[in-house]
Amino acid sequence: MSVCDRMAVLNCDRFDQAQDCKASHFWTNKTGQIVKLAATILVAVLLVGCATSHRSSQALTYAQLDALRYTNADCPKLDQNIQFIETQLRLKGLLNVDPTKLDEPDRVYNATARILIWNLRIGCHNPTRFSNK
Amino acid sequence: MKLAIALTLCVTTSVAMADCYQRSNIKITQQKINTVPTDIRTLVTPDVNGQKCVARYRLHIGDAWTTVEGTAVARTETEACGQALDVKRGVALGEVAPATVGADQQLVCSDLPDIRVRPVRRGELIWESEADLHSHLLERKQPYFVWKQAKCRKFIERTSQDQNLIIYQGVMCQSTTAKNSKWLVLDKY
């Protein structure tokens, strides 16, 4: 039993204070619920925020992305490779975007990632065509 | 009387909307051709010798898409249109303002919607020659590739924004296996 609950019970011992006590107990419970709810929301927001921030920081930089090279040897893991690049786009918020509405750095990142994806798709289905950009 | 007025208005509107070209005497075979005829539209009419086919199509010549017209007469429609699509018979149609056509030049006008290179969007169904060929050397050598059993190619789109030249690239695939079907823009980046 919490301190607040114990206080509410003690206050209820006296009959003449019953009505006030009930109200007080009601508000004590209500306040507790609100506090719990607020705490839960706060924790959830913090967790989502932390998760997003953590994941964003894991997206490859443009330099790292631009350094990626794929060859025919990567074709057996085609789906995983494409998924990896798509994850980078998702982390950057670029998975389903209109390129004409992007600023220069995002446009370059988006184009570089999609060139890699299409090079993999085209190269693995048309082996004589594999190229790097 | 009302019908006559309505018909006159329709004719006037269609004439005003028609796109006109100057038929050149440029032999197509003397140019560097990068593609086979695409976006073909034909007009077949009866002729004393069988069927006359006028084929209008697009060819990527040099560095640009050009509208070409070929004409042939044969016993059947298939034969006539087959011959009309022979690029050796084709003449380039140059876009002109009607005022610039001289007395000795031929002006060809048509109500068919004009096909020209334009900005495209992902998911859009377009004529092949509405998107430019990719400029990469490999793409020029082998413009087409197969993706999920569809004939596809990369394209390039040049545009300017804030006094800056922006070049987009993309991938498009033929929407059906029919020879002259339109193309679906799969991706643009």
Image: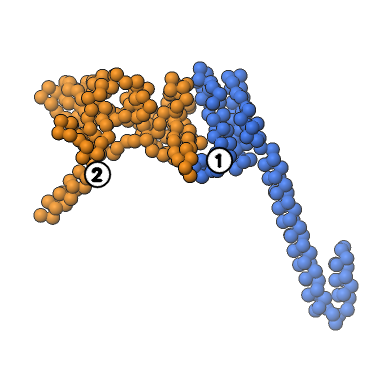
Chain colours: A blue, B orange
For residue B100, which quarter of the picture? top left
Q: Secondary structure at mark 2?
A: helix
At label 2, counting other C-alpha atoms closer than 10 Å, the crowd grade (few under 14, some 14-19, many 20 or more) is some
Residue A2 appears at what percent x and percent y?
87, 63
Q: Label 1 belongs to which residue?
A: A104
Q: Amino acid at mark 1?
A: Glu
Q: Is residue B28 placed above or below A7 in the rendered structure?
A: above
At label 1, counting other C-alpha atoms closer than 10 Å, the crowd grade (few under 14, some 14-19, many 20 or more) is few
Q: Residue furthest bottom?
A: A16
A109 displayed left or right of B110: right
In this rendering, does residue A83 appear at all? no
Q: Amino acid at mark 2?
A: Met
For residue B105, which quarter of the picture? top left
B100 displayed left or right of A21: left
Q: Secondary structure at mark 1?
A: helix
The residue located at (17%, 26%) in the rendering is B52
Quote the CA–CA distance across marks 1 and 2. Answer: 39 Å
Question: For this rendering, which residue is in front, A23 or B132?
Answer: B132
The residue located at (29%, 37%) in the rendering is B114
Residue B63 appears at what percent x and percent y?
38, 27
The residue located at (32%, 36%) in the rendering is B115
Looking at the rendered image, the disc whose residue lies closer to the viewer, 1 or 2, is 1
Residue B111 appears at what percent x and percent y?
23, 39
In this rendering, does residue B135 appear at all? yes
Question: For this rendering, which residue is in front, B31 or A133?
Answer: B31
Q: Label 2 belongs to which residue?
A: B17
Residue B58 appears at what percent x and percent y?
31, 29
The residue located at (32%, 21%) in the rendering is B31
Same subunit, tags 1 and 2? no
